[in-house]
């Protein structure tokens, strides 16, 4: 009996961490117990120090909230601060685990007391690291965590967004997914003002405000949000066009280049096309320099001029 109750309470705690709010009836259905048993288990969690808020009404509602202290049996203050800082750093661009770190960060910051949040922010701002590679703009970890919660809870948000042309306008969206691509993060959301799906670069978002309004989940455009975002980015207009025909199989080029997977198209078994088009002439030069096989180039005149000038400087530097 005791073992059953312990397992049920752990399952209850897990459910409370996966959604912002649960009705008593939904929890009872998930746990296959009565609503009365759920109320008793909630009281037991509170006795153990877990900050569970409840709403009045026939069905009732429960949510795991931030308390004055961390829930017991989890982390002490120093451990919580250390882990939160590490997760923020990882979520900001450590290749391979950004999304996992972001999910863990969202869970931790949901119950992190305010006094510890201030310590985490202060430590994050005070610690600096050496960047050996220019990876471009990175998203604010606090912004990432806030958007992760909004995606999870289907909460409508508002913010100001600056486009690639430099114009800024207010947006009201229903966030669905966060997608990372190299050092950049993108938000896939349904724009209520335009009644269509839109992709937003997180480093161009300012003034993010949760509205408290929850919208029903929408059917996503395609089965894979990351693939949808990648396809949209590949099709987006750029300032400078540069397409290389590479004398190597697509898989070879894909294995030896970074962040170009969706921009490499096979022509035949021995040749592929690499779309290096970009708003930045410098990034085009870096992309082409990273190719490990011979290629011919179809590019705009300004791209060719920039490449020739860069090649002349290199030749001059090497004598």
Image: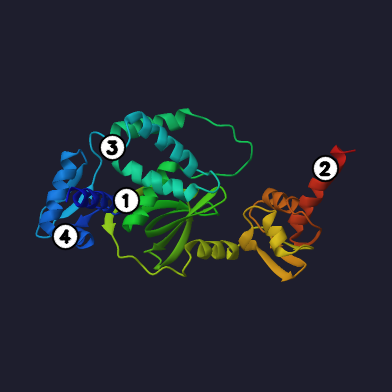
Q: Mark 2 or mark 4, which is nearer to you?
A: 4
- Which of the numbered marks, if any, corresponds to residue 314? 2
Whether label 2 touches label 4, CB < 8 Å: no
The residue closer to the viewer here, 48 or 197, is: 48
Whether label 1 touches label 2, CB < 8 Å: no
N-terminal-most mark, 4 or 3: 4
Please say if 202 is above or below 48: below
Residue at 81%, 58% in the rendered image:
294
Badge 2 crowding class, 10 Å Cα cut-off, few under 14, some 14 to 19, many 20 or more, is few
Badge 4 crowding class, 10 Å Cα cut-off, few under 14, some 14 to 19, many 20 or more, is few
- Which of the numbered marks, if any, corresponds to residue 210? 1
Residue at 37%, 56% in the rendered image:
151
N-terminal-most mark, 1 or 2: 1
Residue at 20%, 38% in the rendered image:
49
Alpha carbon separation for disc pair 4 and 3: 25 Å
Residue at 46%, 69% in the rendered image:
223
Alpha carbon separation for disc pair 3 and 1: 31 Å
Residue 128 point in image, percent of width and height? 52, 30
Secondary structure state at the residue bearing disc 1: strand
Badge 3 crowding class, 10 Å Cα cut-off, few under 14, some 14 to 19, many 20 or more, is few
Q: Which residue is mark 4?
A: 33
Please say if 140 is above or below 23: above
Left-right relation of 46 to 118: left
Q: Mark 2 or mark 3, which is nearer to you?
A: 3
Alpha carbon separation for disc pair 2 and 3: 60 Å
Left-right relation of 296 to 113: right
Residue 93 point in image, percent of width and height? 53, 44
N-terminal-most mark, 3 or 1: 3
- Which of the numbered marks, if any, corresponds to residue 84? none
């Amino acid at each position: 009996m005791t073992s059953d109750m312990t397992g049920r309470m752990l399952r209850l705690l897990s459910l409370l961490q996966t959604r912002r709010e649960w009705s008593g009836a939904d929890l009872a259905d998930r746990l296959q117990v009565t609503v009365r048993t759920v109320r008793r288990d909630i009281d037991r969690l509170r006795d153990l120090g877990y900050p569970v808020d409840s709403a009045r009404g026939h069905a009732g509602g429960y949510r795991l909230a931030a308390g004055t202290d961390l829930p017991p049996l989890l982390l002490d203050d120093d451990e919580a601060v250390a882990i939160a800082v590490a997760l923020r750093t990882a979520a900001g661009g450590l290749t391979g685990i950004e999304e996992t770190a972001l999910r863990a960060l969202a869970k931790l910051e949901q119950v992190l007391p305010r006094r510890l949040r201030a310590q985490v922010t202060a430590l994050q701002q005070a610690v600096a690291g050496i960047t050996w590679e220019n990876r471009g703009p990175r998203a604010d970890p606090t912004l990432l965590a806030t958007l992760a919660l909004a995606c999870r809870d289907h909460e409508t948000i508002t913010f100001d967004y600056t486009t690639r042309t430099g114009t800024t306008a207010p947006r009201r969206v229903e966030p669905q997914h966060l997608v990372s691509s190299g050092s950049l993060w993108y938000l896939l959301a349904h724009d209520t003002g335009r009644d269509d799906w839109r992709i937003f670069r997180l480093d161009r978002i300012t003034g993010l405000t949760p509205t408290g309004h929850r919208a029903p989940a929408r059917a996503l455009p395609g089965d894979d949000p990351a693939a949808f975002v990648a396809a949209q980015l590949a099709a987006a207009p750029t300032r400078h066009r540069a397409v290389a025909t590479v004398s190597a199989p697509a898989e070879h080029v894909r294995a030896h280049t970074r962040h170009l997977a969706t921009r490499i198209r096979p022509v035949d078994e021995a040749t592929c096309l690499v779309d290096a088009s970009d708003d930045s002439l410098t990034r085009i030069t870096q992309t082409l320099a990273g190719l490990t096989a011979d290629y011919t180039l179809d590019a705009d005149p300004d791209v060719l001029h920039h490449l020739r000038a860069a090649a002349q400087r290199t030749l001059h530097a090497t004598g």
